[in-house]
Amino acid sequence: FDGEGNTLWRAQFEDYQVVRDPADPQGRGVALPFVVRFEDPRNGADTLIRMKELTIETAAPPAEVFHQEAPPGVTIERL
């Protein structure tokens, strides 16, 4: 919401299904939404995403997928 109480955007999550966790020795899983909807009423945008299949990855992705280059002129500040 903005300062006046107007909706800026909205996300809805539906059709939860249990996705098996391959790292769980007991074969349990996690409930994940297979339908996600994003709405931006101010701009008249409405996006619906329907997943056919979701999997849980147990291996971490390579570290370089988390690296971002700063655009020219931006000062990098380490915290």
Image (cartoon, rainbow, N blue to C red):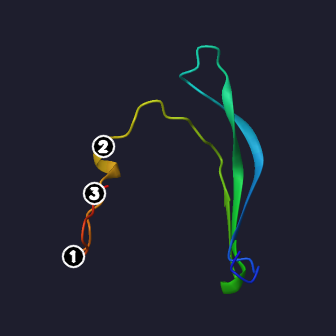
- Few, some or many C-alpha atoms within 10 Å of disc 3 (few <14, some 14-19, many ≥20)? few
Q: Could you tell me residue 79's position as x and y percent?
A: 32, 55
Q: Which mark is first along the chain, 1 or 3?
A: 1
- Between disc 3 and disc 1, the foreground one is 3
Q: Could you tell me residue 66's position as x and y percent?
A: 34, 51
Query: What amino acid is at disc 3?
Result: Arg
Identity of the residue furthest to the front in this view: 79
Query: What amino acid is at disc 2?
Result: Ala
Query: What amino acid is at disc 1?
Result: Pro
- For the point 30% across and 59% down, which residue is it? 68
Callout 3–callout 1 Cβ contact below 8 Å = no
Q: Could you tell me residue 29's position as x and y percent?
A: 66, 28
Disc 2 on helix, strand or loop?
A: helix
Question: Which residue is the site of mark 3?
Answer: 78
Residues at marks 3 and 2, CA–CA distance in whole angstroms: 18 Å
Residue 63: image tag:
2
Callout 3–callout 2 Cβ contact below 8 Å = no
The correct choice, above or below, for 73 with respect to 37 in the image is below
Q: Could you tell me residue 43's position as x and y percent?
A: 66, 85
Disc 3 on helix, strand or loop?
A: loop
Question: Which residue is the site of mark 1?
Answer: 72
- Between disc 3 and disc 2, the foreground one is 3
Q: Which mark is first along the chain, 1 or 2?
A: 2
Q: Which mark is first along the chain, 2 or 3?
A: 2
